Amino acid sequence: MGAQLYCALLRSAGLDVRLFSAPAQSPVRLKKKPIIESPYPVFWVEVLDEAHQMWLPVDPLVTETIAKARAFEPPMSDRENSMSYVIAFEDGGNARDVTKRYTKTFNAKTRRNRIEFTHKGEKWWRRTMKHYQRGWKSDLDQIEDIELSKLEAREPMPKNISDFKDHPVYALERHLKRNEVLVATQAIGKVAAGRDSKVPGGKKMESVYRRRDVKIARSGDAWYRLGRDIKMGEQPVKTVAAKRRPDEMHITDEHDERPGTNLYTEDQTEIYEAPPVVNGRVPKNSFGNIDIYVPSMVPKGGVHLHHDQSARAARLLGIDYAEALTGFDFRGRHGTAVLKGVVVAAEYQEAVEAIIAGFRYEREREREYEREMKVLNMWRRFVVGIRIKNRVDAYASDGEANDENLSGPSSHGGYDNGNAVADDKEYIDDSEEGGGFFPE
């Protein structure tokens, strides 16, 4: 609460101030234990130095420091307070992520506790923080981005083997994944990897490489599904053993004679060129369709129509076409081909689109007719309901009139029962109309 009040005080004095929040990530407690207050702040403020166009951190409550950003990060041994996110809130409701300014090892340690370390987490965090941005960057924001980039670039190389795993700048050969390959063998440093009495000094050193020298390698079929083909004469950079199925676990390495999978890097591939469309004939595979995993795989002279009625339109025109295979839908170990649209010759595109437009028009007419029938049925129900109500009201009025005739004296001094019987007969004759319903 003190940091918020201090921020309000400085803003009332006319200073540009940002309120900072570093949410503490405490472990889940299964047993009740006393909470120990962390000696490092969770809230503090930053004041703008207009002369140098820099934000200066100020904490008069906990650390009692000014312009010492690295004094706010708690040590790794502090289990009650972990600085994973540092968010700056401005008076206009905007927010910025400036964690790199306050952490010493952002890429090596802090990044592992953030959402960016998960699959598609970086995209999710960027999309989330976009809701708190202005929509444009001021000169001060650009200066701050440059400062944060410099701080990240000056981060030293990790000293522990575990910190190199999935590091965005450095990589070890032991941490390479199954589909990763090291294309440059020039090391940029060494790191201690244990003790070895056979080497001088007794320490085993391991080479460190740049992450940019680690490339993704894929099989020929995987590159084909990305719209690329292996160049002629290229040799695989890596061969990996085939994955075993659960029913093949009894096979040992001595008796495993299955061929491995050859992997290639992107530099060993080129853009795939499908056979062209000749005389309106579309090339097809052995299954009667055409592979269109990416738009570049559309054959020359052809066009890919995505509408679901494209095949029907092509059949009505009597032209040659091929259904487009755009991928596979895997559920468990079984994959189902996904067919989306067709590929036809480019000269038939306008004709097929015209037929598709006709299908859409007919579908709209059918929908309009269904809506009209629904409206008419509603009106019919409404009118029938009114007729039923009027008939019921007529029954009530006729019953009251009959009661008056039976109870009241006639002009001859008695009760005119004959007229009442006649009225009843007339009432019975009127019921032939269906009582308000339509007679069958």
Image (cartoon, rainbow, N blue to C red):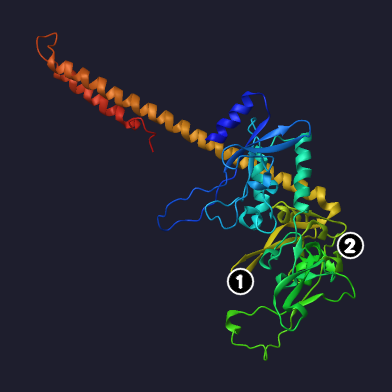
Estimate the x, y position of residue 127 in percent, counting from the top left: 67, 45
State the residue at coordinates (29%, 22%): 394
State the residue at coordinates (77%, 53%): 154
Discs 1/2, front:
1
Instruction: Give yes or no for contact between labels 1 and 2 (Cβ–Cβ under 8 Å).
Output: no
Q: Of marks 1 and 2, which one's residue comes earlier in the chain? A: 2
Is 8 situated above or below 312? above
Estimate the x, y position of residue 331 in percent, counting from the top left: 59, 66
The image quarter in which residue 293 lies: bottom right
**Labelled disc at residue 333:** 1
Residue kind at label 1, given as amino acid type: Arg
**Labelled disc at residue 278:** 2
Dot 2 crowding, Cα within 10 Å, few <14, some 14–19, many 20+: few
State the residue at coordinates (45%, 56%): 29
Residue sitting nearer the eye, 307 or 411: 307
Whether residue 363 is visible, yes or no, is: no
Q: Quick one: quadrant of the C terminus?
A: top left
Estimate the x, y position of residue 321 in percent, counting from the top left: 78, 60
Is 426 situated above or below 332? above
Residue kind at label 2, given as amino acid type: Val
Answer left or right for 348 relative to 43. right
